[in-house]
Image (cartoon, rainbow, N blue to C red):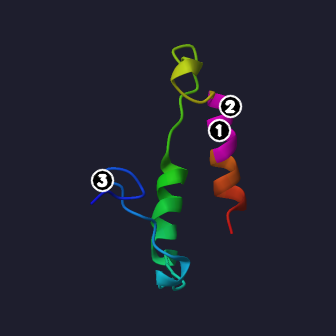
Amino acid sequence: MSSPYGAGAIPSPSPNSFNLRPLTINLSHAVPHMMDLVERTRLSINAEYLNLKAGSALETLVSLKNELVNNFD
């Protein structure tokens, strides 16, 4: 017997077959540790070795770090 969806295909479940419930995650206990790690992160002051093809510009990283340390709520 052949499937109308093609060989080996599994039909999508109907919208009524999902049992979706809200998901709540509380990570507030981890925020102080995360902030400590960010504050203690040392970024290079010499960007000569950085290759922008391999990542973000140093100025961007410094800006993001400062934003997180000074304005995170």
| Crowding at mark 3 (Cα within 10 Å: few <14, some 14-19, many 20+) | few
**Of the residues shown, which amino acid type is indicated by label 1?**
Val
Looking at the image, which residue sits at the far left? 1
Mark found first going from the N terminus, 3 or 1 = 3
Which mark, residue 54?
none
Helix, strand or loop at mark 1:
helix
Mark whose residue sits in front, 3 or 1: 3
How far across and how far down the image is residue 34, in percent? 48, 61
Q: Does the magenta stretch include residue 59?
A: yes
Mark whose residue sits in front, 3 or 2: 3
- Magenta stretch bounds: 58-64
Residue found 50% across the figure and 76% down from its top: 14
Residue found 32% across the figure and 50% down from its top: 7
Q: How far apart are marks 2 and 1 (CA)?
A: 5 Å
Q: How far apart are marks 3 and 1 (CA)?
A: 51 Å
* Residue carrying label 1: 62
**Of the residues shown, which amino acid type is indicated by label 3?**
Gly
Q: Does the magenta stretch include residue 13?
A: no
Would you place residue 64 above or below residue 70 in this image? above
Magenta part mainly helix, strand or loop? helix
How far across and how far down the image is residue 4, in percent? 42, 58
Q: Foreground: 25 or 44? A: 25
